[in-house]
Image: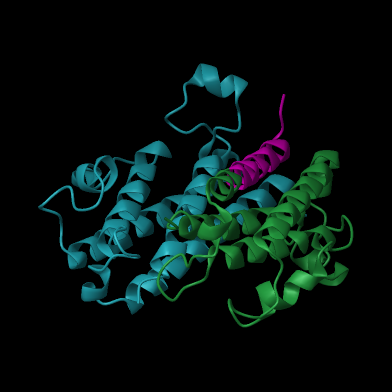
Chain colours: A cyan, B green
Amino acid sequence: MTNQSQIAVKIVLDLWNSRVKATNEIFDKLTDEQLMQEIAPGRNRGIYLLGHLTAVHDRMLPLLNFEKQMYPQLDEPFLAKPDKAVAEIPSVAELRGYWKTVNEKLAAHYSSLQVDEWFQRHTSVSEEDFAKEPHRNRLNIVAGRTVHLASHIGQLALIK
Amino acid sequence: MTNQSQIAVKIVLDLWNSRVKATNEIFDKLTDEQLMQEIAPGRNRGIYLLGHLTAVHDRMLPLLNFEKQMYPQLDEPFLAKPDKAVAEIPSVAELRGYWKTVNEKLAAHYSSLQVDEWFQRHTSVSEEDFAKEPHRNRLNIVAGRTVHLASHIGQLALIK
């Protein structure tokens, strides 16, 4: 008999996996040149979204209490600053590699967690606050980041 | 003591509510004329996404076993057919009203459900299949539709 917490975790992880897969299919289909294009006139370039998503997922490693962030050098050009504000950024090829590595790391950690561990607090909430707001757990982070990823998939799909 | 199923339901409903709110803020900011524009050259118009999201949410009413779909006339122009394929479609003003009504209906039904009822099957899965795949429940539908909504929010945000 499957219990409800286990089912809820499966729902969130299935959605995460399906959206990462959909994103990979889009990135795989786009050439490096296409990723240098803007998603719409005057908007972010594909390379910026690739770097941005990689940085956001990379920061999930410490947020979920798994391990240290792998590529802190992405924070400035892809989180703190808008597209085209930083002159020196990694190449599309480098970012493609980082993106793959970060998601593989996350997947390995996910698969090692027991159901109860998904309901443990994430590292940006204190123990005191977590006692009052027990929904601020790891599962919440993955659900929220899946929604974040989806919003950018809708944009990446516009690159021709 | 809050249990895990209750926490998981809150996580999904909080995300749904925050994304519907974000969408409403975008629609409220855009004029009817702006919603007649394409999100990017050669892509869907704002009015199509408004109709599409309304139709998808409307169909959640029977899918979640709440009540009949309210606006079946939206299926053809906004689900079966792509943008600009159907000449006669409702006005932006009409669609804005339908969008609001459908989401209010859903919210009223959501608030009447007990936690256990979120883990009941949705109406497009048979009892036999549900016994084997208990994650095909109401909560799964709302989580999936939140991700769907997010993907279009990312596009609506591009309208200038």
Q: Quadrant of residue B46?
A: bottom right
The image shows residue B1 at horizontal and vertical percentages of 72, 24
Residue furthest toward the bottom? B85
Q: In the rendered view, does A100 fall on the left or right side of A147?
A: left
The image shows residue B63 at horizontal and vertical percentages of 80, 63
Query: On screen, A117 above or below A46?
Result: above
Query: On screen, A36 above or below A2?
Result: below
Residue furthest toward the top? A128
Q: Residue at x 45, y 68 (%)?
A: A21
Residue B80 shows in this picture? yes
Q: In the rendered view, does A49 fall on the left or right side of B37?
A: left
Residue A2 shows in this picture? no
Q: Quadrant of the C terminus of chain B?
A: bottom left
Residue furthest toward the right? B67
Which of the two residues, A149 or A82, is positioned nearer the viewer here? A82
Q: In the rendered view, does B83 fall on the left or right side of B102?
A: left
Q: Residue at x 64, y 46 (%)?
A: B16
Q: Quadrant of residue A131?
A: top right
Magenta segment boundaries in residue numbering: B1-21
Query: On screen, A21 above or below B146?
Result: below
Q: Quadrant of residue A68?
A: top left
The image shows residue A122 at horizontal and vertical percentages of 47, 33
The image shows residue B119 at horizontal and vertical percentages of 78, 51
Q: Is residue A45 magenta?
A: no
Majority SS type along the magenta span = helix
Q: Residue at x 31, y 76 (%)?
A: A30
